Image (spheres, rainbow, N blue to C red):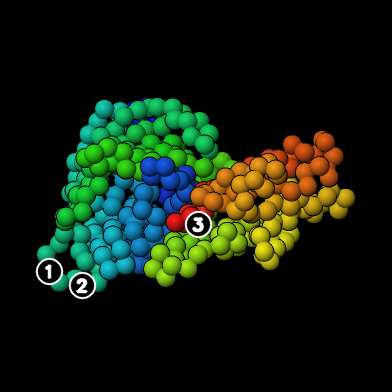
Amino acid sequence: MDQKQSLNRQHFPFIPGAAWTFKATTGEDAELCPMEARLPEQGPGVLVTDLFEPSRDIYVGYEVRDDGLYVTAMANGPDALFHAPEPTKILPFPTAGGARNDATVLLRNSLSLAGEPVEATFSILVDGPLTVDTPAGVFEGCFLTVMHQQMGDRSASTRVWWAPSLGPVKGEALTEEGLLKQVELLCARIGQQETGDMTLALDFDFFEAKHRILAGEAEAGEPITLGDIVQGIRPLNVGLQRIEGLCLVEIQTRGQTCLVFADPDDPAFPPVEVRLVRNAALARRYAGRRLAAGAYLALLKPGDHNPDALPRVHRLFRKVAGLLAYNTALPDPRR
């Protein structure tokens, strides 16, 4: 069978260290979400975190072979770890569009080997080849898998589009009522290959820390400042990464948080100041962009730059606004 006309191992580049960043949309809310592949502490395969529930404690262990995709382990949380005594094929390669495959994986609790094994069932329908448009680019030769998965009383129905040499580029989590969550690829790093805008790459440590902070905020009722969020976003760490050739050189946190960008290669280039404000009128005065309820981003002193440099400054502003809009999950101060 022609490799371009079938779903095959090229669509599952699950190698240790591979990392994907998605825009995840649930209703009207959107944020950046990571997915990663890593080696298990023991046993075969590669652990791949869940596309729709980003957590290092929720994953599936896979082995990608020439003849198919095999499951080696599953985890639904830190206390729900299971392994397959033998890797089990859930999808044969190559598979043409229109094919369906059903499989059952027997799993044992990794924390307690006693008791009967648990069954995980997979029902997968394949469609393709397809062309898929995402924020990371347009990808040809993609295949769609429509999968229903059942393990005990836990079930999931998903639609995932897979691109050659890149893996998942788009996905939908479904319920009986309809679409629950949609994810679209923003960027990915697989080995030496980078796809999309890597300034949006989200560090998994930050993602999990942010959600712990937000959960703590919900319990304690303490406000989370925009400065707290800025300090945790990897591309906005001081001196770490350039955006439009400009590097964040300072985060001023007295009063309103202000980000100061400069060009390390051109000392004559005037610094660019981006301020986080809660005053809508001030935001409008300085080309403001709304990030969340009551939170805005303002670009200060754009007139100090040579007119030829202004497009670069405004591109920086748009990218920083995008980063913050995806990553802020701030309570409405009016409530």
Vertical placement of residue 257 versus 102, above or below: below
User: As rendered, which of 122 and 333 lies closer to the eye?
Assistant: 333
The residue shown at (38%, 42%) is 27
Residue 111, quarter of picture: bottom left
Q: Which mark is residue 112?
A: 2
Q: Quadrant of the C terminus?
A: bottom left
Residue occupying the point 64% across, 45% down: 281
Residue shown at 15%/62% (left/top)?
117
| Relative depth, front residue between 182 and 134 | 182
Give the labeled residue for mark 1. Answer: 115
In the rendered structure, which amino acid carries the disc numbered 1? Gly
User: Quick check: marks 1 and 2 in contact, CB under 8 Å?
Assistant: yes
Q: Percent x, y for residue 74?
A: 28, 58
Give the distance between the C-alpha atoms of the residues marked 2 and 3, in whole angstroms. Answer: 47 Å
Number of numbered tags placed on the structure image? 3
Confirm whether residue 316 shows in the render.
no
User: What kind of element bears circle 2?
Assistant: loop
Whichever of callouts 3 and 1 sits on the residue coming sooner in the sequence is 1
Report how far apart the C-alphas of labels 1 and 2 lie in the structure: 8 Å
**Which residue is denoted by mark 3 in the rendering?**
333
Nearest to viewer (mark 3 / mark 1): 3
Pick out the residue farthest to the right: 268
- Amino acid tagged 2: Ser
Tag 1 secondary structure: loop
Give the Cα separation between the discs numbered 3 and 1: 51 Å
The disc labelled 3 sits on which kind of residue? Pro
Q: Of discs 2 and 3, which sits in the foreground?
A: 3
Q: Residues within 10 Å of mark 3 (few under 14, many from 20)?
A: few
